[in-house]
Structure formats: C-alpha cells, structure tokens
C-alpha cells in the first residue's frame, strides 16, 4: 500500500515515525514554514495546485490511501482531499486532534469577529496566538499586542503597536504564567487548535482570570472518517494494509 500523509503537525510526524518503513509513505508539507520540523521518510514540500493538481498527483503516484494530519484550521486542504479522494474512491482518514473545551471563553467564528470582540470589550493589551495569517484582522486596532507565531507575519498585516515573538511549542504552564504577568496581558486571543503543545496558555489565563477569545474550528467535510489519536490512525492504516 502506498500512502500520502498530509502533515505539518506533531501528530503527522509521530504517525510517519510509527508507519515508516513498514508502509510506503510520502509525507507532504505545505511549505509555508521556512524551517519545518521534518518527519521521517520521504517528504514532498509545496502545494499541489488545487483540486486538479492533487487529483493528478494521486493518480501519477498511484496512491492507495490518504491520511490528513494537517492543522485543524487547514480547511482548504482538508476540503480538497475529501473531494478528490471521494471522486477517485481513495480511502481518506482525517486525524483530528480533540478540540479544547472552550469553558468560559468568548467563542467566535473568525479572526474578524475576534478583532471586533477585542474592540467592543476595550481590551488594551492582547496576547495574540492565531498564527501568521491571523494578525491581518487586527491591523487597525489601537491596542498593544504580544504576537507569538512560528513564522513572521507579513509586515503589512501587523498592528501598529506590537511585540513579535517567533517560537514553536511545546509551551509550559509556569512560562506562560510569567509571560502573561510580565506583559500585563488583559485578554488572550487564540484558535481552538486543541492538543497539549499549546494548551498551557489557556490554563495560565484561567489562573489569572484573563478573558479568552477563541476562534472556533471550521467544520470538517461531511462524511469524512476521523481518528482522534495517532494510535487510532495507525490501526486504520493497518486494517487497510491487511485487506
């Protein structure tokens, strides 16, 4: 069996390690991160060129199954994979890490709605962790932002008053607590990415009574098969390979 693993996440790297070399696996990374953490085994980097490009690639490479282990907010890639795999009758599994329980967070549907919530509540010092593309909605804000991202956002889409921190998790509770205190943060704006690598900021904000504005995940395409863990995904692949 030849498998395409759409990766770019910690779960994707763990799954690649669990499957390689027993399964003929190719991991695909979007190429948006200049220095990505690479999985074991063969890796391709870059987009496919939309639905048509993905369809051609799957045919040319004679792919038998696809596991989508992209970020929960990589909605376009997930939609393309679901469409093409459905057309070609290629088994598809979406490895979707469980979402965080939002608790008392203010849940919004988009970065734009998050920016409106910040303005409406007059938060003046924000910890913004929505990724490099998530800063665009806040460019007109008069608030001060501590922005944390893996790669640097386009300078044209940064708010006027900010400090940029480039780093990659995992993050730890004591460090997040100190970060929020030291920068006198009044609100945390984040996406519901789920997982343990970045969860500590939510726990630290809760301990300090700091409000959280959380962007909800985009819905998955209808009918896709999902797994909540690497172990579940590994079992799914094993069942296919043993048919």
Image (spheres, rainbow, N blue to C red):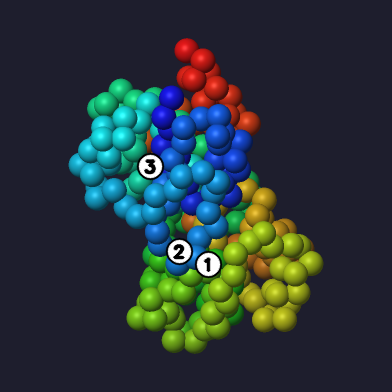
> Element at badge 3?
helix
- Distance, label 3 to label 2, CA atoms, is 18 Å
10 Å crowding of disc 2: few (<14), some (14-19), many (20+): few
- Of residues 184 and 87, the one drawn nearer to the viewer in this rendering: 87
10 Å crowding of disc 3: few (<14), some (14-19), many (20+): many
- Of residues 117 and 163, the one drawn nearer to the viewer in this rendering: 163
Vertical placement of residue 66 versus 243, above or below: below
10 Å crowding of disc 1: few (<14), some (14-19), many (20+): some
> Element at badge 2?
loop
Q: Earlier in the sequence, mark 3 or mark 2?
A: 2
- Distance, label 1 to label 2, CA atoms, is 8 Å
Vertical placement of residue 181 versus 150, above or below: below
Q: Is residue 233 visible?
A: no
**Residue indicated by mark 2:** 33
Vertical placement of residue 78 versus 168, above or below: above
Are the two marked residues, 1 and 2, in contact with CB atoms closer than 8 angstroms? yes
Badge nearest the viewer, 3 or 2 = 2
Q: Earlier in the sequence, mark 1 or mark 3?
A: 3
> Element at badge 1?
loop
**Residue indicated by mark 3:** 78
Picture residue at 34% right of the left edge, 26% below the top: 90
Residue 150, numbered circle:
1
Q: Most extreme residue toward the top, as rendered?
A: 243
């Amino acid at each position: 069996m030849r498998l395409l693993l759409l990766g770019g996440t910690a779960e994707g790297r763990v799954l690649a390690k669990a499957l390689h070399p027993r399964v003929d696996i190719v991991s695909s990374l979007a190429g948006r991160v200049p220095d990505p953490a690479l999985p074991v085994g063969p890796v391709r980097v870059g987009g496919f060129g939309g639905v048509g490009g993905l369809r051609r690639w799957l045919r040319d490479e004679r792919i038998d199954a696809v596991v989508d282990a992209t970020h929960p907010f990589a909605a376009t890639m997930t939609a393309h994979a679901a469409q093409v795999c459905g057309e070609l009758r290629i088994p598809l599994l979406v490895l979707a890490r469980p979402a965080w329980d939002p608790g008392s967070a203010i849940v919004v549907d988009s970065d734009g709605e998050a920016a409106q919530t910040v303005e409406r509540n007059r938060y003046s010092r924000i910890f913004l962790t929505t990724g490099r593309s998530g800063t665009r909605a806040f460019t007109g804000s008069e608030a001060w932002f501590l922005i944390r991202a893996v790669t640097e956002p386009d300078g044209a889409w940064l708010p006027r008053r900010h400090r940029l921190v480039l780093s990659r998790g995992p993050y730890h509770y004591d460090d997040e607590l100190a970060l929020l205190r030291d920068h006198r943060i009044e609100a945390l704006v984040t996406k519901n990415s789920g997982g343990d690598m970045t969860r500590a900021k939510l726990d630290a904000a809760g301990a300090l009574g700091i409000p959280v504005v959380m962007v909800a995940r985009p819905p998955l395409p209808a009918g896709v098969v999902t797994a909540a863990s690497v172990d579940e995904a590994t079992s799914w692949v094993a069942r296919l390979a043993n048919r």
